[in-house]
Image (spheres, rainbow, N blue to C red):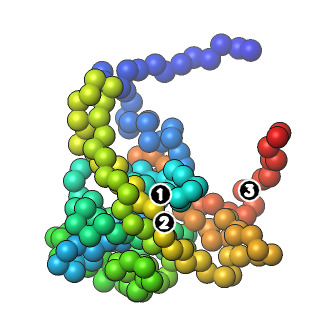
Amino acid sequence: MAEKELHYYEPAKGHGLKHDPFNAIVAPRPIGWISSRDANGNVNLAPYSFFNAFCYKPPIVGFSSTSWKDSVANIQETKEFVWNLATMDLARQMNATAAHVARDVDEFGIAGLTAAPCRLVNVPRVAESPVAFECKLSQIIQLQGADGSKAEAWLTLGEVVAVHIDKALIKDGVYQTALAHPIVRAGRRGDYFEIRPDAMFEMPRPD
């Protein structure tokens, strides 16, 4: 095998590139499109680049906020949130909810989205989104470095207690991931990918 020419760097000393490659390498990543409500009833809707699923039983999802933002504050107060699937046809609306606005400003209205009531949590879901997870807070963890120093980042984990799925995405009892055309986050400040049926392939596990 031919030896590769490597770009090597130590993050603490800088990456030496035009854009930090870290979040472009760990890609694509699902989008944490999180709706929440504060103790006064104000609703918030915001997308988070660092989001994923972490456990089957109980089903747990989580997102990391790189500062103490409204979503985290709201969830700490009310112990509830909703994850909404961001799809290609909702990309512009999702991006609109990333705007920095006052805590009492409703991002559903800014993006022209419909706030639909949930069943088990007092937080609205995005009616236009084909999938939503109602979540109860399990943990909020301030992240830290290897040396124990606290990072300005908080990981919010929630147990999924109810799920809403558009039946059009279920074929023969199987949820069709690509049929929803979800969008996922890549690098820089605005790079995304669209997941499409023609880009999928199957590779059974050896066991």
Amino acid carrying mark 2 in the image: Val
Residue sitting nearer the eye, 74 or 192: 74
Amino acid under disc 3: Met
Q: Which of the 4 image quarters holds residue 105?
A: bottom left
Q: Are marks 2 and 3 in contact (CB under 8 Å)?
A: no
Q: Which mark is residue 200?
A: 3
SS class of the residue under badge 3?
A: loop
Q: Is residue 100 left or right of residue 128?
A: left
Report the residue marked by disc 2: 160
Query: Considering depth in this image, is 34 or 49 the residue closer to the camera?
Result: 34
Residue at the spot 29% in from the left edge and 35% down from the top edge:
144
Label 3: few (<14), some (14–19) or many (≥20) C-alpha neighbours in 10 Å:
few
- For image coordinates 36% across by 62% down, the residue present is 137
- Regarding residue 54, the answer to whether it shows in the image is yes
The residue that label 1 is drawn on is: 61
| Camera-side mark, 2 or 1 | 2
Residue 157 rendering spot, x and y as whole percentages: 40, 55
Q: Earlier in the sequence, mark 2 or mark 3?
A: 2
